[in-house]
Amino acid sequence: MTDTLMVGVSGIRGIVGKDLTPENVARYAAAFGVWAIDGKRETRKGKRRSRAVVLGRDARTSGPMFAHAAIAGLVSVGCDVIDIGLTTTPTAQLAALHHRAAGGIILTASHNPIEWNALKFIGPDGIFLDTDAGARVQVLASDGSLPRADYGKLGQVTPDNSSIPRHVAQVLRLPAVAIARLRRRRFRVALDTVRGSGGAVMPELLTRLGCRVTGINLAADGRFPRPPEPLPEHLAALGALVRRAKADVGIAVDPDVDRLALVDERGRPIGEDYTLAFAVRAVLGVGRSDARTVGRRRPRGPVVCNLSTSLVVEDAARDCGAEVIRVPVGEVHVARAMQAHRAPIGGEGNGGVMYPALHVGRDAPVAAALVLTLLARDGRPVSALVGAAPRYQIVKAKVERGTRNAEGLLEEVYAALRRRFRDAAVDTQDGLRLTWRDRWLHVRPSNTEPIIRLIAEAPSGTAAEQLVEEGRKLCAAS
């Protein structure tokens, strides 16, 4: 791995033209293609093994170039390619399922800055690759002996221009989405898709949900006008649009549309964790206007989220009579735990909602439909829903990896933190998470950037900052 090329379980990402090049995109796509059509992997009895791989890209300007490279790599090892073009990550996951493909590749660097791009690998079950599968693809890409097809066995390329309309239609049919009520309510929604691929799906979905949409940054050209991650500090323009348009809610998505953040009716960003908390209440809870239907059947089971997810999700789950199961950061870990525990809802605190009634993947269109359903059912504005629950402040920081922790080991930092906070409950599934009744600190190496992430939550920003500062000092000394 170079300083910026990140080779991980479910793909690779790097800076375009520096170390993410068409050559290594083609090589890794070919390696994934060999894994996908490998005859030694299990298939359902009596089913002919698919040789098709779904390929999509987000709106980044390097996407078309890398799509050509990925197609060349896949075709060269005998894979047929179903090219879904400009799309979103959840749409690509659903397309892999729809076509019963051997797998899928989505070209997207998600929330990373504009100069980055990536390949993310999807298994035939629509879920990103796990550790074992990802390691196998890495070996195939690095050993220099990929089995190339001869001239008569090269793969074919077929376009599929219906993946996004199909995705929208599937969201509209979800059992927890109150279509009739939403269309009567006719919410005013302010929308910011950061000039990513959200412009190709979110306006259409919201309009079909009966919303009156006013938007900024809707062109899907990949020329991000602001940092693309939908953090509160990046949503000032959306907040101003909410106030100007007198919108009921502001919605922002990241460039590949698997994360969603909210701005309340006063134009104030409320933090990404509320997206999952609201989705939990939409699926498992009953709003004030539904008081007469408390006895009706509702999905039951645990809520699965990662270790860096806010306590607001625990509060929402507890109010709905559900327990919370926490797992390491990474969509695949949440997805596998949701399957194992048959969780009806889950996700990550970065605005990624996973609703297995459709698929076990982070999905911003699903999140938008569930959040709006909750608002329609409950009747209170966003600010009132936020104000009705205990408030917490999350502080996040990043520290560059030093030479001693370049591989993410960090044991010395973890040991020092455990000595410093002997009264905390300890979780070592993913880095180190220290937990108290109303606060926590999580220190872990990033999976997507060459940094260490420090995240703390507490009833006040000052208390959370103090926890982060303790972690920062110890990381600097490592």
Image: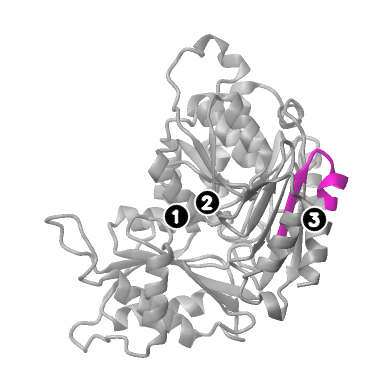
Quadrant that contains the C terminus: bottom right
Q: Amino acid at mark 2?
A: Val
Q: Give the x, y percent position of residue 226.
A: 74, 63
Q: Residues within 10 Å of mark 3 (few under 14, many from 20)?
A: many
Instruction: State the CA–CA distance, disc 1 to disc 3.
Output: 36 Å
Looking at the rendered structure, the kind of residue marked 1 is Thr
56 up-or-down from 139: above or below = above
Q: Amino acid at mark 3?
A: Val
| In front of the other: 42 or 279 | 42
Asked if the magenta segment contains residue 2, the reply would be: no
For the residue pair 408 and 177, the one nearer the viewer reads as: 408
Q: Which mark is residue 201?
A: 2
**Badge 1 vs badge 2, beta-carbon distance below 8 Å:** yes
Left or right? Give the position of 394 relative to 145: right
Which is closer to the viewer, label 1 or label 2? Answer: 1
Task: Name the N-terminal-most of marks 3 and 2.
Answer: 2
Single out the mark in the foreground, 1 or 3.
3
Secondary-structure class at tag 2? loop
Looking at marks 1 and 2 on the same chain, the residue that comes earlier in the sequence is marked by: 1
Picture layout, residue 459 above or below residue 50: above
Kind of element beneath mark 1: helix
Identify the residue under disc 3.
468
Give the x, y percent position of residue 381. 72, 27
Q: Nearer the viewer, residue 111 or 410?
A: 410
- Residue tagged 1: 91
| Region rendered in magenta | 454-466
Q: Point out the residue furthest to the top here.
A: 292
In the displayed image of the protein, which residue is found farthest to the left? Answer: 46
Image location of residue 342, percent across then percent down: 40, 38
- Indicate the quadrant where residue 393 lies: top right
Q: Residue at x 71, y 31 (%)?
A: 382
**Where 409 falls versus 18 (above or below)?**
above
